[in-house]
Amino acid sequence: MSRHIFIVGLLGILLVAALTGQDGPAFPYLYIAAVVATFVALKPFLSKILSPARRYLLVPRRWLGVPVVPWNLLTHAVMLVGFVAFSAAMFPHQAGGDRPVDHDHPVHFFKIWQLREMLSHGELFGWSHRWFAGYAPNYLYPIGTDLMVLLVWAMGFGQWALDHAYAWTFVLFWGLQGFGTYLAGRALVNPWAGAIAGVLAMLDNGAFRFGGWVFAGQWGVWPNSFAIAIGMIAVSYLPRVLQEKDRRAVAMFAFWMGLSLLTHPLQMVHLGVIVVVALVALLSSTPEASRVLGIARLGVATLLSVGVGALWLFPFLSARNQSENLGEPWRNAYDMGNQLYYGKLLEGSWYLAIMLAFVGTVALIRSRRFGPSFVGLMTLLCIAGASLWFTTSFHLVRLSEAFSFLQYQRFAIIVKPYAFIAAGSAIVGAFHLTRSGSSPFRTFIAVLMGVPILFGWVDALRQHQMDRNFSEASQRPYKQARADLAAWLNDAWQKREVPFYRIETRLARHDHSFVDFGTMVPMPIYKSGYTPAETLRFKPESSSTAVLDALNVRYVVSARKLAGPYTLVKDFGQGLTLYEYKGWKKDPFVVTGTGKVTLKEWSNERIVLQADQAATGFLRLNVTTFPRWTASRDGEPVFISTESIPDERTRTAFMKVPLQPGTYVFEFKRGLAENLGLGVLLSFLACGLLWFSQIRPRGLGIIELPLLHIEGSLEDADSRGQSDAVLGHADCFGRRCAGRARGVDPKNQGIHEGHRGALRLPANTSIKPS
């Protein structure tokens, strides 16, 4: 009571001094500092009041057959809402539904819009003439982000626009970065380390190809970071998969990791590294359960996650030879150490967080517990394994050409959540070292004096790590001119005399702001210059007349005046003009030889042409080749070769067939990979069975018996191996062997208990040794 009276009296004196001071204005943060200091000082008193409610919520219960701990659910819900609210505070305009349009964002938006159009026709994979010289949507770039935006859009039942859904999904993604990192940190180290790591993940500034705000937000390459955020939710189940008989954890790891595989191909590498590092951490840490059984559960979880991701993985792998090689090595090991000294190893990331991560990594690797050692090893091995020294020393590119497709800088995006968890653990460790022995009075004084300084520090943090500014759709350039242009082009398309032509958008090479203009007009768009978010090898980029002829370009949208083979059609104001290409070709094919060819049918996946009786030579269809295209003449299969045009020799590959009289039919047909991708349904079913088997007290009966038999056999093998190891070393290192022997039951009672746990038999049931 005396302590409380002293605190109230001191607060009164401070407030009187602040209100009656004549030398200058009261310090603006004094009141807040006093409140914070009072809360810290009264924390023991408040804990006594709230502890009964916490004890009540910590009691495990079963809701709808599912065992839950209400306190954990409440904590997760509060943290999720908190991280998403923090994200909304960082991006207030996006929280209001204003879509970002910087760099790659318009490209992602068009992909999402086109996927919605395809799904409305019951198609997930197929062919489209909308981009380049035609391309196969969803084969070469993952679909997880697109599906998530469409899910948010569908939740509105048509009451909100796709623009709003995109903006809200981005806000949700940014919050999930923090929440996923928090869950992993909570499970692997401790809750406070996870919470700090989640905040650091959301505040990360990053750099080009190094994640964070610059890459995921400003450059718009957010599917990569989104996939890792989802993957970290899966990682949070890893300790339970390896160390507990929890089949629900196996199901949840597979579910979330499978979704991350659907979201970005780099997660295939992430999953492989997780498995390897988890095995190393498990075998080098103090055993807490059957290692053999844990490894088996991890194998099952990994296979199921690949099954969930098969919806996109199998079609992608079947067409991977059509993917553009964008691989690029990172620094060598020496340069990494040099950059670590300057705090620039993870470019653009906060210097303080990186140095704390280094200290935390060293401490975590020394731990003999699985969770901390896993975080430390992931942080170290992901960085070292991405070095040029590692890739060249082990000749990875010679081992598999797939390694040449990796941008090793993006390993920094994988390592960041683990590095932030390590930084969080370092902060928590330092706090524990300083808190012991402090009195409430000294704590009150320290907080009171330190909070005003902390405000300045936090304000600097806000300016450098939280000040995020997008270019948004509501304020984008040419807004009215775009609408007028779209209306004119829509009217011209209705009056067209041919079934097909393209328009070109000619801006700066890396200006992608007009890609989403394709959602406003019905005709295909050819964007000159580089186009991200689509790794197709054969995507022309130049504006030469040879390319315009081959792509049947009729109109050119430009932000500058054009001369030569262009005629001005209309100036739409704001600097946006429309030109007609004088030499545009009406036929989407080229005949090399004699005879006449007529276009009979033109659609995305079926093209029919008629060659007359004088036809000889070759027929080139101005559509990019792809493994799913087939050709026939009068019902007989025809071999498809490829032909490039000189101006874009490495970026064009049009379909070419021998020309003879008859009817040519080009068809895009889906293959086995698309059907195998539907195996995701079986994987979801398996995850559901694992989940349900954990809920039911007696499992799933005869369906589960084979799995339980294998589980018991693995426990037998692991226990016998440990027993043999102890007996074989009984004559040496007596103290160490005694320590090991304490963990082994010489009468094999541990084996029997393992069977009893696996088969869920009553406690009084005896099992005879086999």
Image (cartoon, rainbow, N blue to C red):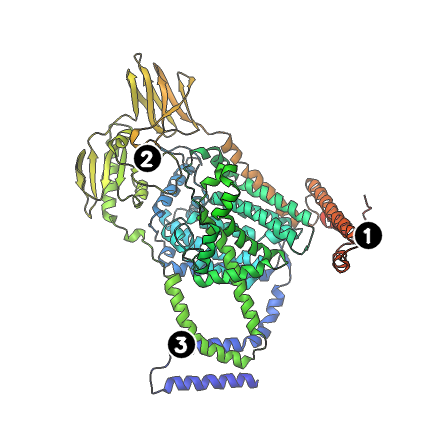
Tell me the CA gap for discs 2 and 3: 59 Å
Q: Which secondary structure, mark 3?
A: loop
Nearer to us in this view, 274 or 180: 274
Numbered tag placed on residue 540 in the rendering: 2
Question: Residue 132, how many percent across, how many down?
Answer: 33, 35
Tell me the CA gap for discs 1 and 2: 73 Å
Q: Is residue 605 left or right of residue 483?
A: right
Name which of mark 2 and mark 3 comes first in the sequence. Answer: 3
Question: Residue 58, how many percent across, how many down?
Answer: 62, 63
Check whether the beta carbons of the residues at disc 1 and disc 2 lie within 8 A of each other. no
- Residue 26 sits in quarter: bottom left
* Amino acid at dot 1: Lys
Nearer to us in this view, 604 or 625: 625
Q: Is residue 553 left or right of residue 300?
A: left
Name which of mark 1 and mark 2 comes first in the sequence. Answer: 2
Please tell me whether residue 665 is drawn above or below residue 473 in the rendered image: above
Q: Which secondary structure, mark 1?
A: loop
Numbered tag placed on residue 747 in the rendering: 1
Q: Which residue is mark 3?
A: 29
* Amino acid at dot 3: Tyr
Q: Which secondary structure, mark 2?
A: loop
Nearer the camera: disc 1 or disc 3: 1
Screen quadrant of the N terminus: bottom right
Check whether the beta carbons of the residues at disc 2 and disc 3 lie within 8 A of each other. no
**Tag 2: Cα neighbours inside 10 Å, few (<14), some, or many (≥20)?**
many
Which residue corresponds to the image point at 44% horizontal and 87% vertical from the top-left? 13
Which residue corresponds to the image point at 50% horizontal and 59% vertical from the top-left? 420
